[in-house]
Image: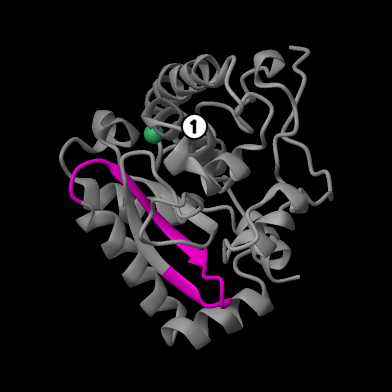
Amino acid sequence: MDRRIFLRNLGLGVGAAVTAKDSLAGVISNSKNIIMENYQTLEFPALPFGYDALEPYLDARTMEIHYDRHHRTYFNNFVNAVKGTPWENVAVEKIFADISKAGDAIRNNGGGFYNHVFYWKNLAKASSGPSAELSAAIARSFGSFEKFRELLSNSAKTRFGSGWAWLYLTPDKNLTVASTPNQDNPLMDISPVRGIPLLTIDVWEHAYYLKYQNKRADFVDAIWNVLNWDEVNRRYKEATG
Ligand code: MN
């Protein structure tokens, strides 16, 4: 399939248009994963692996429905929501920084679009593990990797209803763990937890119910087998560089 991929590593800042008083502005302006295209010409981004790539931890049928139905619907609804609005050509991270002005359709569907692109990239069949730099930061912030794992897992397991658990970097460059409801994320100005996301776990029931049914905790424990630490390391380096 000849897909045009618009999620580019541009290496460009978007600085000037970001609200100066936003404490995250400097970090966001350094992001290298910004959608710079008109969303009306943006094709639905490809899944970076096959549906069965993460078996047995994430089953192929769940992956197919999650990507091709849930994620695609968020994407289509987001494209429709921004059409003809001032947000139509604005990088999605910058929309999030002003999401309180953009309305619920852009908030929910923009979050659903972006969070899933982010999630797919932080999953892989195999990866190297946390870098020396990230490991040191995890030890500073949480005491140990095992403590970090416990905190992120608990955040995912205890999120009431639908949402996402995150490892993120606060504006003062500390690693923190928290969850957000619905399709919110730490880049959104309405979020009580704010920072640069590094790693996420989708805890909507659609992410696990076919295989794990009501046992969200088993899904959360299993996902540690397929986290893409190469991508988390890259994000950490980018956010701290
Ligand atoms: Mn999902």
Q: Nearer the viewer, residue 104 or 151?
A: 104
Mark 1 crowdedness (10 Å alpha carbons): few <14, some 14-19, many ≥20: many
Residue holding disc 1 = 110
Q: Nearer the viewer, residue 51 or 147?
A: 147
Q: Nearer the viewer, residue 18 or 187?
A: 18
Residue 40, how many percent across, how many down?
Answer: 66, 14
Residue lying furthest left:
214
What is the quadrant of the N terminus in the image? Answer: top right
Q: Type of residue at label 1?
A: Gly
SS assignment at label 1: helix
Give the residues drawn in magenta, as a range: 160-176
| Residue 172 part of the magenta-drawn span | yes
Q: Quadrant of residue 24?
A: bottom right
Q: Quadrant of residue 182?
A: top left
Specify the quarter for ligand 1.
Answer: top left
Residue 211, how many percent across, how many down?
Answer: 27, 33
- The residue drawn where x is 69% and y is 63% is 26
Q: In this orientation, does residue 73 appear?
A: yes
In this view, 128 is above or below 90:
below
- The residue drawn where x is 43% and y is 42% is 100
Residue 152, how many percent across, how many down?
Answer: 36, 65
| Residue 71 part of the magenta-drawn span | no
Residue 188, how many percent across, how many down?
Answer: 47, 49
In the shown orientation, is residue 219 left or right of residue 2?
left
- The residue drawn where x is 84% and y is 50% is 11
Q: In this orientation, does residue 32 appear?
A: no
Q: Nearer the viewer, residue 226 or 100?
A: 100
- The residue drawn where x is 57% and y is 61% is 22
- Count of numbered badges drawn on the protein: 1
What is the quadrant of the C terminus in the image? Answer: bottom right
In the shown orientation, is residue 124 left or right of residue 201?
right
